[in-house]
Amino acid sequence: MQEQLSTARLIVDFFVHCYRISGRLDVRKRKLADQLNDRTTAFLQLEDVYVSNIEHPAHITASHPASVLRKQNVTAVVVARQDDGLAREHTYGSYLGAYLRKVFITIPFFEIQGDLRLSGRLDLRAVLATGTDRFVPILDGRMTSSAHSDIVFTGGAILVNRDHVGAFWAVEEE
Amino acid sequence: MAKILVIDDNADLLETIRQILALRGAHQVVVSAEGADGLAKATADPPDLAIVDVMMPGVSGYEVCRQLRANPRTASVPIIIFTARGQPVDRQAAMDVGADDYMAKPVPMKELLERVNHLLAKRAAETAHVLAGMVVLLSLRGGVGVTTLAVNLAATLARARDGTACLVDLCPSSGHVALHLGLRPEPNWSDVVKIGVPDAEFVEALLLQHASGLRVLASPIFPVVGQGLERTVVEAMLRVLRQRFAAVVVDAPSVLDEATMAALGVATVVGLVVTPEAPAIQTAVGTLRVLEQWSDKFRIILNQITPGAKLPTEVIERTLKRLLLGTIPFDPAQARALAHGAPLALHSPTSPLAQAVRGLVQET
């Protein structure tokens, strides 16, 4: 007997401009982070989509059986389980010897705090400018509305689109 | 075995939950794949508990929850909401529409079963205390038979509990509890006014003894001029009585004075007595609004003090947004009982009124 809903379809919160878009993503073949960072396609296909304005993020204003998101417009993605927010290559030991740094990031409408996983010295500019991955995973993340501090989203991982990052700093001194 | 209604548009999940609740929980499970159909099923035959998914096409789970709470037939049904959206704001939204519990998907089935059983047990415990413990009977519209009901209820409880019941008359304007029982109201609580907060010994000395074993704290035969009992005094007296007796019934006056507010505060349950007429219902609506902080304690009792129904029960329940706990039928023998100081519950136990009052107690 099935004890828990299958995780083949991951339920994810996407933030696009001032909208919260919750939907199911098929992750049977590719993980969420791999799909987001795949530069060969600009879109992401979702099923059972529910839309809210971030001013009233629990109030569902629309629902659709399917939707497509333009990845470059997604500012952040919140997933409950940390593992669901990591790329496949990052979940099998490649982070041996890695450490976590607390960071603070601003994106449109939100500020994000959480842990950035690093294997070397923190170079803030390099995190945002080098490599090909558009989405940076912030672990154990907490995303707070800039305008309404009582609106908070938490997740095992928050994938932040570095193209939308306004400010970025390490919380602790090195 | 409880009857559980599960509303979710995900057929696979619906079947999984049905199997878990039926096979492991031994519950009767009714399923529905959409909000409107689920609401219709809930209204037609109210379940003991409902599990509602938020995200459904058509009527959302939040709307289902709102409508269940607004309907007197389903207003008290425990509701578990679950949703793919598992953020704190989503939990708060679920609680705001009246859900009792909230679970984020993926739903661990073992935990779901535990929460279902916990809510069912909690509800059973709550209903088990209907008209038990400290029962305050109240109506802010006078003349609806609160005292008659209080006397018969207390007498019924005294008989059921070998006399370990007490009846308190808080009316400052010549209360009639003693008259109903054929007792002379001496001593009465006017003596407490002189001394302030009483101790247990003092309260015990004020109690009258009825032949049935029922103890009575009577009100003074002459109306109290000026301020009556202070809140702290009433609270102290009722606490003493609650410790001493298994059941305490309070006949509250038709005004929200210090004494009434104190009694409502310490009450286990409040029986709001209404008659089937528009002024009484209007007063009850206002009472429930003003005393909203004790909303959970209130149970509605319909007292038909004259022959022939005026307002249908359904209309009263819909107006008050609550189900009736019970209906006390018109009983012509009540007038004779009052004249003889012999409550029907004791001297005519097969009378319609006595049977109906017993029904209220048997809810326990």
Image: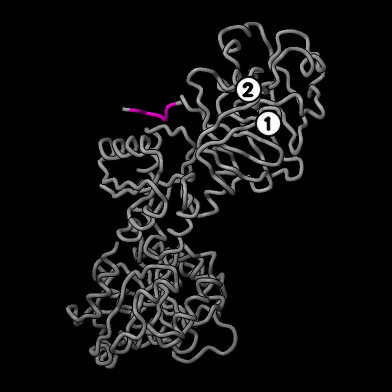
Q: Secondary structure at mark 2?
A: helix
The answer to whether residue B45 shows anywhere in this view is yes
- A104 on left or right of B201: right
**Would you call the spot at circle 1 few (<14 residues within 10 Å), some (14-19), or many (20 or more)?**
many
Q: Nearer the viewer, residue B293 or A120?
A: A120
Q: Earlier in the sequence, mark 2 or mark 1?
A: 2
Q: Secondary structure at mark 1?
A: strand
- B2 on left or right of B235: left
Q: Nearer the viewer, residue B167 or A52?
A: A52
Res. B12 image quadrant: top left
Res. A32 image quadrant: top right
Rendered residue at 57%/47% (across/down): A62
Give the numbered dot on residue A52.
Answer: none
Our reading of the magenta stretch's main secondary structure is loop
The relative height of residue B153 versus residue B126 in the rendered view (above or below) is below
User: Would you say the residues marked 2 and 1 are in contact, meaning their CB atoms lie under 8 Å apart?
Assistant: yes
**Would you call the spot at circle 2 few (<14 residues within 10 Å), some (14-19), or many (20 or more)?**
many
Give the numbered dot on residue A74.
Answer: 1
The answer to whether residue A174 shows anywhere in this view is no
Residue B53, position as x, y percentages in the image:
45, 44
**Magenta stretch?**
A2-6
Residue under numbered circle 2: A36
Host chain of mark 2? A
Rendered residue at 17%/78% (across/down): B350
Q: Amino acid at mark 1?
A: Val
Rendered residue at 49%/75% (across/down): B285
Host chain of mark 1? A
Q: Quadrant of the C terminus of chain B?
A: bottom left
Rendered residue at 78%/24% (across/down): A171
The relative height of residue B355 versus residue B222 in the rendered view (above or below) is above
- B236 on left or right of A68: left
